[in-house]
Structures are given as C-alpha cells and as structure tokens.
Amino acid sequence: MPAPTQETPSPDPEAPASLARTVLDAGDISRALTRISHEILERNKGPEDLVLLGLHTRGVPLAHRIGDRIAAVEGTPVAIGSLDVTMYRDDLRSQPTRSPHKTAIPPAGIDGMVVVLVDDVLFSGRTVRAALDAVSDLGRPAAVRLAVLVDRGHRELPIRADHVGKNLPSARTERVSVLVSEIDGQDEVRIS
C-alpha cells in the first residue's frame, strides 16, 4: 500500500474500536459524493470542458466515483486523471519516505479546461498548495476548483474547498482516517 499523506494518515487496524468512532459510513459517503457531483455540474453548467484530477492516494478513487455519477446524470463521460504531488510538497525533508505515484492527465490535457482537484481530507492546505504547483507545470486551465470528502479545518494556508462532503471540526491532535473500498476494502471515515 502506498505511503499515506500527512493529511490522510493510514487507518490503524490495530487501534481499539473504543478509540475510533465512525463519522461517515458507506451510505453517508455515497450521498456526499452524489451531492458533490451535482454541485460540480451545477457550477460548471454541465460536463463540458471538465477534468477531474484525483490526488493520490484516496482522492483518485473518489474522483472516479464522482466521474461515474456525473456520467450517469449527463449521459456523457467526463475526463478523469490522477495527480501526484510528492515532489511539490514542502515537507520532503521531514518525511523523505514518501513514494511517488503516477500522474495521469487525460489525453486532451488541461489547457482551457475547468480542473476539479479531488481529495479525501482537507486539513492544513499544504497538499492542495502542492497540487496547484503541479497543475501549473502541466498546463493552463481556465479554472481550478477543489472537492473534498472531509474538511477538518486547521488551515495553515488560505485555501478553501469549493465542494465539501462533510465539515468535520476536529482537534489538531485527533486523527481523521478515510477508508475507501478500492484501497481499504470498505468505505468509512473515522476520527480517533
């Protein structure tokens, strides 16, 4: 399994159940992604010129699920890709063990497109800042927006999500873990 990001630590399967509580179950996640999909379509006035870029690791399957929902509503597929921000992060010196992933941009590219970055958790904003740097190296989109499943606050940078599944106020010392069936075998958001 790829190394987790600072904002989305790997769930600890050894943690006692009493220390972690589920804040979103599979049904909650499904409804949140459906709502986000409709919000993206409304704001963009349809699927034209839209590209979803999932941030590794758990943002990638979330981007594909949003893309599937948009295609089901509109009857036309939306371009989906993945974005690795490892080399754009400002914490490589303190966490050098990150393993890079593949960046996959749709064949039409991102120039002139509306790019929606998709991630699982928005915390300090540093991953999104790195993603913005990565996108600027790949092309010149017409607009860049952000969709996240969970916004837990504690921003260190002036970054705000355009589409949020769940605002989850949390203490800095708490850990928010997002599990997705494609990687973890189940859909759940836990806080511990």
Image: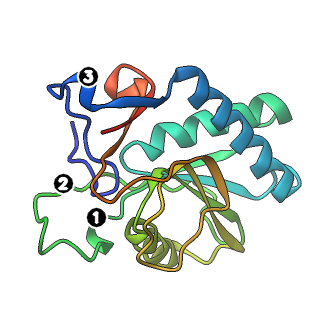
Q: Is residue 67 visible?
A: yes
Q: Which residue is mark 2?
A: 99
Q: Earlier in the sequence, mark 2 or mark 3?
A: 3
Q: Which residue is mark 1?
A: 86
Q: Earlier in the sequence, mark 1 or mark 2?
A: 1
Quarter the N terminus occupies? top left
Q: Amino acid at mark 3?
A: Ala
Position of residue 159 measured from the top left corner of the image (x, y, whole percent): 54, 74
SS of the residue at dot 2?
loop
Categorize mark 2 by other alpha carbons within 10 Å: few (<14), some (14-19), many (20+): few
SS of the residue at dot 1?
helix
Q: Are marks 1 and 2 in contact (CB under 8 Å)?
A: yes
**Left-right relation of 60 to 80:** left
Categorize mark 1 by other alpha carbons within 10 Å: few (<14), some (14-19), many (20+): many
**Which numbered marker is on residue 17?**
3
**Rendered residue at 33%/49% (across/down):** 8
**Left-right relation of 34 to 28:** right
SS of the residue at dot 3?
helix
Report how far apart the C-alphas of labels 2 and 3 lie in the structure. Answer: 29 Å
Q: Is residue 75 visible?
A: no
Report how far apart the C-alphas of labels 1 and 2 lie in the structure. Answer: 8 Å
**Which numbered marker is on residue 8?**
none
Q: How is the image coloured?
A: rainbow
Q: Are marks 3 and 1 in contact (CB under 8 Å)?
A: no
**Rendered residue at 30%/31% (across/down):** 20
Position of residue 3 measured from the top left corner of the image (x, y, whole percent): 20, 47
Q: Work out whether 45 lies above or below 182.
A: below
Position of residue 158 measured from the top left corner of the image (x, y, whole percent): 52, 80
Q: Earlier in the sequence, mark 3 or mark 1?
A: 3
Categorize mark 3 by other alpha carbons within 10 Å: few (<14), some (14-19), many (20+): few
